Image (cartoon, rainbow, N blue to C red):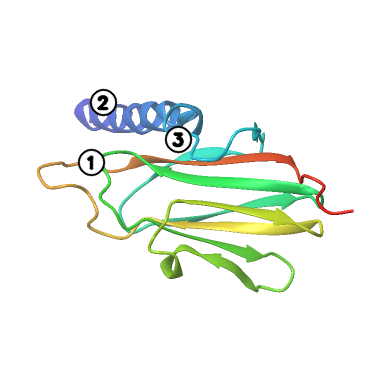
Amino acid sequence: MKKFIIAITAIVASVSMQAQDCAGYHKKGCSQASEAGFMYNSQSKSGVFAPGTSSNMKVVFYSGFDYSISVCPDKLLANGLAFKLVDSKTGEVLYDNATDNKSTHMEFSCETTRAVTIQVTVPGATIKKGQSVDGACVGVLIEQKPTPKVGF
């Protein structure tokens, strides 16, 4: 019985440490692929993903701002990470990286304030050859800047 309790404690500690390591992954694991002038948005998050899992993250984008979104998988994960932006009210898919060559970065201007769900999916069996992990970090870095005024 003691061995069982020790084994369970070790597993829980391992999972806790892994989750803790991912807490700020979007700040250190995501390179800022956006142009100059973008500022960090506090809605950015990171988490542990196992192969074949997905997660939804609700955010609000405000009118009058340009946004940059970078989804950054841990280097243990192979290519193929999928992400979508879905209007939380209507369910309309606003962006799907499957139609953008699986890009992990995109930028847009927001004309109206709207609630959006960012759906991130790590396909199954994406761990690079020779690696054995239960999960890896994925970060979603959101940056913003005021939309520049153009025209008259």
Instruction: Please provide percent x and percent y for residue 78.
Output: 25, 50
Q: Amino acid at mark 3?
A: Cys
Instruction: Please provide percent x and percent y for residue 111.
Output: 79, 59
Q: In this rendering, is residue 73 above or below 51?
A: above
Viewer-side label of 3, 1: 3
Marks 2 and 3, the one that precedes in the sequence: 2
Q: In this rendering, is residue 107 above or below 143?
A: below
Q: In this rendering, is residue 94 above or below 4?
A: below
Q: Amino acid at mark 2?
A: Ile
Q: Farthest right residue?
A: 152
Q: In this rendering, is residue 6 above or below 42?
A: above
The image's mark for residue 6 is 2
- Dot 1 falls on a residue whose secondary structure is loop
Instruction: Choose between 54 and 35: the one closer to the eye.
Output: 35
Mark 1 sits on what residue?
133
Instruction: Please provide percent x and percent y for residue 133.
Output: 23, 41
Label 1: how many residues lie within 10 Å, few (<14), some (14-19) or many (20+)?
A: few
Q: Amino acid at mark 1?
A: Val
Q: What is the CA distance from the residue labelled 2 to the residue labelled 1? A: 21 Å
Label 3: how many residues lie within 10 Å, few (<14), some (14-19) or many (20+)?
A: some
Label 2: how many residues lie within 10 Å, few (<14), some (14-19) or many (20+)?
A: few
Viewer-side label of 2, 3: 3
Tags 3 and 1 touching, CB below 8 Å = no
Q: Residue at x 74, y 68 (%)?
A: 89
Mark 3 sits on what residue?
30
Instruction: Choose between 95 and 120: the one closer to the eye.
Output: 95
Residue 108 left/right relative to 140: right
Q: Residue at x 26, y 25 (%)?
A: 6
